[in-house]
Image (cartoon, rainbow, N blue to C red):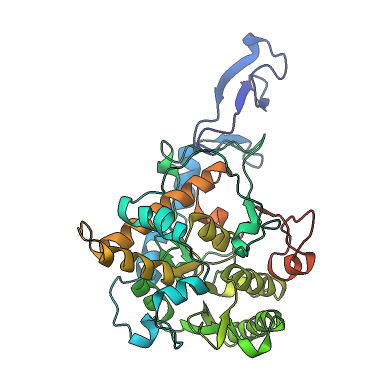
Amino acid sequence: DRNGLRPGRFYITKDDRVVLGSEVGVLDISPKDVLAKGRLQPGKMFLIDFEKQQIIEDDKIKNEMATAHPYAEWLRENKITLGTKASIPNQSRHSRAPIYDLMQRLRCFGYTRETLEMLVGPMAIQGAEALGSMGNDAALACLSTTPRSIFDYFHQLFAQVTNPPIDPIRESIVMTLACPVGPEGNLLDRSPGHANRVFLEQPLLTTEEFFNLTHLKQPGWKSHELDATFSVTEGARGLEASINRMCEAAETAVREGTKVLVISDRRTGTEHIPVPSVMAAGAIHQYLVKKMLRSQCAIAVECGDAREVHHFCLLTGFGADAICPYMAFETVQHLIKKQTKKALTVDQAIESYRKSVNAGMLKVFAKMGISTLASYKGAQIFEALGVGRNVIEKCFTGCASRIGGV
């Protein structure tokens, strides 16, 4: 059962029959023949063991599973966590391209005044998304006369009929953004190696946490950076060529033992154009899935274009394990320093921004009835509106795009 949302009523009869259905009265059974009756309770299991010819109680099942191996000891010895402090070189903190003016870089990544004043600002200062009226009368991205981000071409699906939504506030106890990343072991095996993964409390990482993830000092944890930009001289064809180059480089790196792939567009500048982060992450994710290598590495994205809750949902939904939106953090820093009355420090504002993104992501999960990031990651629960089939096949394989497009 999932949180009491899967109805299940059962009868156990005196002649050793078990009748289980979504409602009482599926079959007509005389009350005098009923030995016991009940319902599947929230978070409980109902198991009939045909070999032992008995019903196994919930507590007994969980106790047997939990004590089968020394899981706690395996976690203590193998689990990897990230520190919050790091000595980051200046070339890793800021853009590696000769564009030092913040406003130039914001325009490059599609930021607008509305983005600063109505989205990033309130999220950093208030710790929550700004409230607005219902309805969105803006033109669809595929029909808009102004350039739009690739993120705007996707729409989140929501729960219908058999998959009821969750209340992310009242049922928050069963929801989490914590998730292990890195190489996965054989699901049919049980060994200490399964615990040798990096455990992240949330997918949105600060600059320091991201640096620590990509510079782990653990034995065997090697990272490889993929440049998500292409030269201005290549023109429009450079986008596809850059994606192909990253996919091939990712395959080579993973086969050589890399455990953390870093997709970074920090070289963006007057000479280099950024590849949209969701296209880069989606293409590499799908390419590694086809090569049967995806479960052998983590994909970390360092990008300047992601800033809204929808953007982070798209990135995780299309395969990203960790995200560092460095331009959003620099924007928060700029907004806080510009304030005359400084109620928050820069670190507090960044944490407030992360808190609002986390709450927003959980709200999106809840619409689909999903409780954890582990279930949402790579699930591609989106519909594309106005994206061409060639782009879908390369970057978003399996995502519905009924009308085609750019």
Residue visible at 59% across and 63% down? Answer: 187
Residues 226 and 402: in front is: 402
Residue 93 percent across, percent down from the top left: 36, 81
Residue 378 percent across, percent down from the top left: 61, 61
Residues 7 and 37: in front is: 7
Q: Quadrant of the N terminus?
A: top right
Quarter of the rendering containing residue 313: bottom right
Label count reads 0
Let me know if residue 313 appears in the view: yes
Give above or below for 321 relative to 129.
below
**On the rendered structure, is 164 left or right of 27?**
left
Quarter of the rendering containing residue 335: bottom left
Q: Quadrant of the C terminus?
A: bottom right
Residue 138 percent across, percent down from the top left: 60, 49
**On the rendered structure, is 69 left or right of 16?**
left
Give above or below for 146 relative to 326.
above
Quarter of the rendering containing residue 37: top right
Let me know if residue 74 appears in the view: no
Give above or below for 270 relative to 82.
below
Residue 305 percent across, percent down from the top left: 51, 68
Residues 299 and 263: in front is: 263
**On the rendered structure, is 184 left or right of 210?**
right
